[in-house]
Amino acid sequence: MRKLSIFERAIILLGAFLTLSSIFLFFMQAERLGVWFGFLVESQKSPLGRLEYSVSHTLRKPFDSQSFLSLNYQQKVFDRDTVMTDDSAEAVLSFADGGVINLGPSTLVELVSRETNPLDSGAASELILNVQKGEVSGISGTKKLRVQKDGKMIDLPKPKDGSLLAKVLEQDKSAMKTECQVKADLSNPEAYRFTKDGGLELTLLSQCEEEPESRSHVKIFDSRHQVLVSHQTLPARIKFPSPGLYTLMLEESLAPGTPLTIPAEWPGISFLDTKPSCGGIIRWKLDAANGNPSVRFLIESAKLPHPEPFEKPSATLTDWIATYPAQLRIRTAPNVHGFSWTSPLLEIKRAPACNELVYPKNQARLGHAMVSTPVVFTWKQKPEQDEVRYELSDSADFKKILNTQMTRHNYARVPITRPGIYFWRVVDVKSGEQSEVFQFKAN
């Protein structure tokens, strides 16, 4: 017999390695490879649970398949799946409702989920473990776990001492399942954006114990149990058409459905001033994306039992509130979807005050006799005011100041040397608040 050359032996060894690798990939990774290469379609059903721990090989046969596939760590199991362990294997499955089961060696069990019958108020959701051979034990979650063996229903046995599940539970019960929840931070302006049609685009994260951000897939249902979003990876920006109760399911982490309530009132109104200006005027703005929609505003306060809507983003508080201190907020009148934007709560400790002009009155006419006699401008001063600045101008915008005086009194003597239309005001030096502007005509 001819002796094989080194090259020929290398070719044979390489061929044997590739053959064994192909066999391993087929039996151990067949399902994953099938999904990757498009030969198989990953189940679109919600998973019942996943494999948490195993000793030796554990196999899974989907309901619509004729062959068993390798079930690896944290791979999912679904309704009507059959799970099998070999002679030396032992496995632990965890379920989305918190239940866990232990499969002993040489065990074959079919997982059958029975949901609540809406016509039977007494019916309860349950998971049937149809044991065809072997031993199954465990702990129920929110769904009732029932065992069917030899055609009879029996209670789920507790895990035996020395079983894989018993060993795991002795270490850390929380290790059986990664607890995740959907996180939506409405207090962070960068986490949401309002749409022009009144919707809300909100950034959702899946917050898990083991990792700060899990890239889980999410499925979202509205109040009518219609799917709003399906198989979208978090973090993601989700558009909610209207406020209400939405149910979210993190599919990869197997977290139970997490109700998320989108509030009927969304933050979006911010005050431009935290204190009313002189005269009691307070202003705000609506931070809505794509321009401000057509809205009407309401001032809400205990001092205002029946607020009236108005359209301008400002108001004179003295027209609305008579006694102080007062707390108030601004919100929009509810739109056709029933929601509104709202501002933070604003506390005003005392009534806004300013210097009240007295003489010359607004739109007054002064005769020629005053040319030789200074006009005495008078006003009512604000309480606790130290110093004011009197200003006279021939234009309403006060770009050109004809006369200015600093005084601690409530009057100023100013000669008017020529006819014309004049404007005057006083300014609180400390706060910068301006009084109203009065206009008069000198003949």
Image: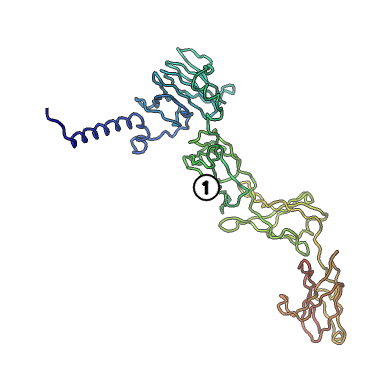
Q: Residue at 59% across / 21% down in the picture? A: 122
Tell me how the rendering is colored.
Answer: rainbow
Quick check: 328 above or below 361? above
For mark 1, does the 10 Å Cα neighbourhood hold few (<14), some (14 to 19), or many (20 or more) residues?
some
Residue 378 point in image, percent of width and height:
86, 74
In this rendering, the answer to whether 237 lies above or below 41 is: below
Most extreme residue toward the left is 1
Q: Quadrant of residue 83?
A: top left
* Viewer-side residue, 284 vs 427: 427
Give whichever of 153, 171 is nearer the camera.
Answer: 171
Return the x and y of residue 297 as percentages of the image width and height: 68, 55
Mark 1, secondary structure of its residue? strand
- In the displayed structure, 119 sits above or below 343; it is above
Above or below, comparing residue 430 to residue 122 in the picture? below
> Where is mark 1, residue-wise?
237
Quadrant of the image for the C terminus?
bottom right
Give the position of the N terminus as an image quadrant: top left
Q: How many marks?
A: 1
Q: Position of residue 221 (x, y in %)?
A: 53, 38
Q: Is residue 140 left or right of residue 330?
A: left
Seen at 58% across and 45% down, the residue is 242
Q: Is residue 38 left or right of residue 388?
A: left
Drawn side of residue 369 relative to residue 128, left or right: right
Residue at position x 50%, y 39% in the image: 218
Q: What type is the residue that disc 1 sits on? A: Arg
